[in-house]
Image (cartoon, rainbow, N blue to C red):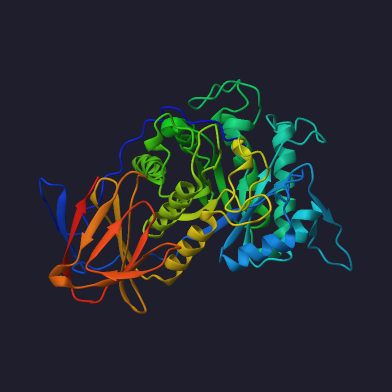
Amino acid sequence: MVRAAKIGLAVAFLAAGLLFSKIYAANHTTSFWVGKQPLAERAERPMIGLGVHFGIGGEYGYSPQKSAQVLRSDAFDSVRDDLAWSLFRAAPATGGATTQVAREPAKLFDFLDQTQARPLLVLGHPNPLVPDGQPPLTDVGRKSFGDFAAKAVLATAKRNPIYEIWNEWNMNAVLGRPFLVGEGDPSDPRAAANYSALAKEAVAKIRSVAPQAQVLVGAVGMDPDWKWTMALVRSGVLEGASGLSVHLYNHCEREVSNRTAEAAIRQVSTLRKLLDTAGSNLPIFVTEIGWPTTSKMCPISTQTAANNIAQFLLWTAATPWIKGTWIYEMKDQGQDPAALEDNFGLYDYALAPKPAACATREAIRVIKGAGPMRLEQPFPGLFVIETTTPAGKQLIAWTSQDNSSATFELPGGTEAEFAPLCQQGAKSNTIRLGPTPVVINLPTKAPFELKATLDR
């Protein structure tokens, strides 16, 4: 999985919805009402998943038993891994049965047998064992891939997976070339036209054997201004798909202020607007997002990574058009503190928790305990979610930058219980906010006016 640096990515700033009544003041203080407007229901809570590495070979230090325990204890809904074309084998049907069972790669299926998390299986990777399969750019290669996809779906159907067609084709259909910008010329294997032809073949073959299967297309890697992605939309590749999957990485942006969850939110919100303009209402699945905690290149602290992941997950819970998010990845896949690819984990190489492990687990707990939500930005860079729980009304709030803070002041000396994620709680009339999301349990269900001050 390729993580090239995104440099100078220009995206439009996410416009805050005016969901609360508010009055702006010149001294960076505003008042807004809590509890005056109905909260927005969503049909279903977004899926929250985690990436692992059992399916593509190599030694990354993953243990099936320990990984299954993390998924269970941290309450993840799904787990994402590769079902590689060249490694896949299905056991022959026996005793008159017509349904095959997936057998290889054995590590992947041994792991999946130990978890109840719903699999997201990436159908991809070049296959040197078939004609024109490395990568599939001809009718012969695409037909072979489509046949593999259909067989893989039949052999794994009992697990009720989500399927994703390839992984970051626009970055790694072939390697060793300069970064692809835009949709690409068809002479370039990474071009949108080549992926579109492959995905159409695969989706059609899957639908012929499993009409109700959930199939995602795209798996889009770095794509400034979403030009490659929108070329896919124009090609009609979304027809027949269950969703568009994208990957969001900004850890090497030139400006440190753009290495944030807020920047990722702006980026995917721009895509949503482009899809809407194009007349597509297909939901978006963020099948990879993460921040590596490296010591040298593009350094991001472990706490900043934790804050970013928690912020993004909480935002998705209040954003109905995001159907799922998969964090990349469960654990560090290497032990070099300076290597980007080695340090994306919520846990370190030995499965000791980093701050992001607790922040993610706490964010999931908050999301699963919440009812309808409303999202507000009283100031740029200050996010507030209003929701309800069985215990009463709740706010979740944070600032988007490491060096920014804000203060909430409750009216009339009223006090509320509050706690930043993974920290001890307190009770006060004045609540200090920073990049670690703060959960505030309000003492009343009645509407009231809350004062917010942007400190810096």
At 36% from the left and 42% from the top, the residue drawn is 266
Instruction: Give residue 420's position: percent from left, percent from top.
Output: 38, 62
Relative to 404, 213 lies left or right: right
Residue with the most extreme right position = 95
Q: Quadrant of residue 368?
A: bottom left
Residue 157 can be seen, yes or no: no
Q: Nearer the viewer, residue 369 or 202?
A: 369
At 73% from the left and 35% from the top, the residue drawn is 126
Which quarter of the rendering shows the C terminus? top left
Q: Nearer the viewer, residue 390 or 131?
A: 390
Which quarter of the rendering shows the N terminus? top right
Relative to 55, 285 lies left or right: left
Seen in the picture, residue 376 relative to 289 is either above or below; the reply is: below
At 56% from the left and 63% from the top, the residue drawn is 76
Instruction: Give residue 389's position: percent from left, percent from top.
Output: 36, 74
Seen in the picture, residue 93 relative to 242 is either above or below; the reply is: below
Instruction: Give residue 42's position: percent from left, percent from top.
Output: 38, 64
